[in-house]
Amino acid sequence: MENVSTPRRGFFQQGFVLVLPLFALSFSLVLAPVSSYSAEGLGKQYLQDSLKLYKKGQYYSSARYAFAAVQEDSSLKSEAYSRIALGLIQAGLPNAASYFFLRTLQVGDPSAVQSVLTQTQHLLDILGPDLLRKYLVRHTKYNDYNLENRSAYLYSLAKDALLNNDPTRSVQYIDGMTKGSLSYPFALLLRGSAHSILGKYDESIQDFRECLSRISRVKQRDLRDDLRDRCTAGQARTLYEMEKFEEAEQVYDQIPKGSYVWTDILFEQAWNGFAREEFNRSLGKLVSYKSPALSFVFNPEVDVLRAQSFLALCLYSDANQVINEFNSRYSKVGEEVKTFVERNSKDLANFYDFGKSALKARLSTKNQMYQMANRFVRSPYFQNLVRTEADLRHERALVSKLDQSIRGEGKGFLGFLDEVFDWRRHTLELLGGAFVKNSLIDYHADIIESFEKMAFIKLEMLKLAKEKLLTQPTLETAERQRGNRIPERKDYQYQWTFNGEFWDDELGDYVFGLESECTN
């Protein structure tokens, strides 16, 4: 029988290409010149003072004087931008620094570019790759980087290549990275995915295993745990692609039930059982989604696989019931998502706000659009975007405090940084909004595809039911007995009569005992 539904083959949350606008903010508020300076060469004098202050550890004041320098003499902007960026980074203001970092890259002076690129890895760790990646790819070259930061650049190129459907080039970039780089564990996940796409399964598994061996290098706990689970899942998925289903099952079992990805892994394990024609095991995995503890899960393909498993056992009434429940559950939310996307198609801020609202809502919400959003807004990526808003508020407060401690220098820099923070807030709206919008579109497409699969299953079911009636006398059709076949069990599994109760520690471990009604 033809499979009408297949498990997802992707190995990481698909990204998107979004070039963030870097507004040329107006330097409209000036820093009052110090009276001892002559008018001639004032800009260069400010730059010299900026360097002296930087060496003394007065990083914020250093950035202010560099800001004054470019106001006095625009020809100094290359060095001034780089000096502002470096000063703000050292002052603990990475979001404010990011604007001047990118402006330095755009101006393109080799010396200035190379000076700020020494902070590439640091900024990627704090800000993430999406703000910087396109500018690094467009405005920098391999030889611009020192050894420590070159790997961060190659990782950006590798991710960009994979997003543009070029896994071969992605692998080549990662091959050039230093294994001691902080980005290297994440690069191994990327390379494992690229190798799997290329059908190089042995290399893929090796990458995922090496990723797990280097996981301790990731400092942030939530990112470390998420990377561990994704590399484990990547290994299991590759084994599935190789049709090594028993090995895949063993690796899947290593992912903890408390993991962010586990609710999807449970579905993939169901597919693994289906691939082995262990339809009762597949149904046992899927029944866990009926538990109140997993009521927040939104995955239409779960019902598609349930219907397909019942169909494989020729249990047509069960398959028909699943199809009817599916149509009832997903018709309304499909229309709601379509309407929301069309109404807000040109306003990414609304998508970002929707994502934040879904994130704030209870996980067990009855709002179906929020249930769908749970699949992506609770990812480390989106939560880090939201967390950055809090970082921006902290940086604004820190700038105000630092600025108040400096007397006699005017307030021009503070006013300009307010504009920078507004720009940074806007980039979060664009990144978060595009992420939410693209995710909603993708999952809506999944719903439509699932409806089409259900329609196919129903047609197949009616066809097979008709053939059964034509080939078997109705009087010979005995009443179906459930549970009268003992399924093959693992050593640690027991057989109990299910009474409708779910236990959290047993979720994912159920196996049905239905007897097939197929006659051939």
Image: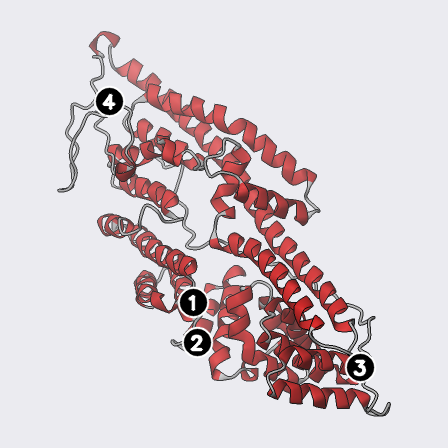
**Which of the marked residues, 4 or 2, is nearer the chain's N terminus?**
2
- Residue 517 bears which disc, if any? 4
Query: Mark 3 and mark 1: span between their CA atoms?
Result: 40 Å
Tag 3: Cα neighbours inside 10 Å, few (<14), some, or many (≥20)? Answer: few
SS for callout 1:
helix
Identify the residue shown where x is 35% and y is 17%.
466
Residue in the foreground of this view, choosing between 389 and 442: 389
Q: Quadrant of the N terminus?
A: top left
Would you name the residue on which mark 1 appears?
Answer: 187
Quote the CA–CA distance across marks 2 and 3.
37 Å
Q: Secondary structure at mark 4?
A: loop
Give the distance between the C-alpha atoms of the residues marked 4 and 1, in whole angstroms. Answer: 49 Å
On the image, the x and y values in percent for residue 23 come to 74, 65
Q: Disc 2 to disc 1, how far (Cα)? A: 9 Å
Quick one: label 2, few (<14), some, or many (20+) residues within 10 Å?
A: many
Q: Which residue is mark 3?
A: 74
Badge 2 or badge 3: first in the primary sequence: 3
Q: Residue under label 2, please give it.
A: 177
The three-letter amino acid code for the residue at tag 2 is Met
